Image: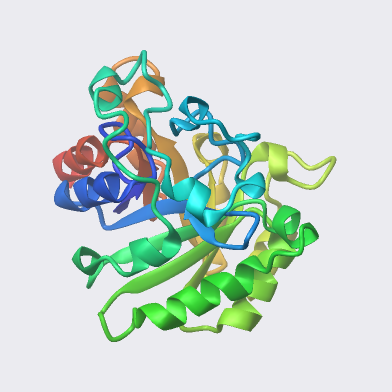
Amino acid sequence: MLVFGHRGACGYLPENTIESMELAFEQGADAVEFDVVFTKDGHAIIRHDLDLASTTDINDHSFLSTKIDQLTKDDVSRLRAKERYPDGRVDSASQDGKYFVPSLRQLLGHQQFNGKHLIIEIKHGAHFEALGIDPIQEVKTLLDQSDWSSRDMKISLESFEFEFLKRAKVEIGPEINYVFLSARDTLPEGITELTDELLVEIADNFDAVSVAMSMVLTGDLVARAKKMGLDIYAFTARLETAEGNVEKWFERLVSTGVDGIFADQPDLLIKTVADLT
């Protein structure tokens, strides 16, 4: 089973920073996942939320807005990352202000990621398109310029937006992997699980499906996905939300049979996988 660093190793260092991703790989993660949003001048930035207040020091500055789509690339370059959960992750919070907020260009150009697997989640694709930004072409351009293939890197692209991800595959091409994301609250209205019909459509278009952990803890979704030739991943394993004993909880997550799990503390999940092997 594969272990993916979720926003790097964000249980230990502020999320979506290059330092957090380096730590995840140092801990043995098979890949790192990170999120991409866009500035008002169309630059790809590594953040999860449209509003930057929770994960940067933007409130210490005099910008008129805390929203990424109201800021320029130069504005963002002045910001520093901070811990999203300072009360629960005190050690990580002690690193507030040390790390810059990276752009996708900076991240893809980082030589320490040669030979590594990077998982790019484009957030709010339709939202940015409505603002006149072209997220797919921006990501394609940056990938092309990074020369990732000759650097022995593996790239996966994921999104909760089905049609957006389909267009991304057409425009960027089949050289990278495509992963459709799903959670119960993102399913079509009136549907409470991924039906066989939906899985067929996903399998016809993409390489894998990644789902919220609650969707694989019960039921037969894992078996049905694998029967259709889909790799299936689950998110997110984290120490702070473990139900009861952490080791037993992580063992339960691994026992679901998914092909990979996204983890805030990759080292803990890697240990669980090793102990069960």
The residue at the point 63 percent across, 81 percent down is 171
Residue 162 vs residue 116, the one in the foreground: 116
In the rendered view, tell whether residue 20 sits above or below residue 133.
above
Along the viewing direction, whichever of 234 and 95 lies nearer the viewer: 95
Residue shown at 77%/58% (left/top)? 131
The residue lying furthest to the front in this view is: 62
What x and y, as percent, mark residue 135? 63, 66
Q: Is residue 206 visible?
A: no
Percent coordinates x, y for residue 257 in the rendering: 39, 48
| 12 or 128, nearer to the observer | 128
Residue that appears at 54% across and 36% down: 52
Along the viewing direction, whichever of 272 and 158 lies nearer the viewer: 158
Residue 122 in sight in this render: yes
Quarter of the image for residue 218 reads top right
What colouring does the structure picture have?
rainbow
Is residue 166 toward the left or the right of residue 246 in the image? right
Q: Residue at x 70, y 61 (%)?
A: 162
Label tally: 0
Q: Position of residue 8 (x, y in %)?
A: 32, 46
Q: Quadrant of the N terminus?
A: bottom left
Instruction: Give the image location of residue 17, x and y in percent.
Output: 34, 46
Image vertical order of residue 1 relative to residue 99, above or below: below
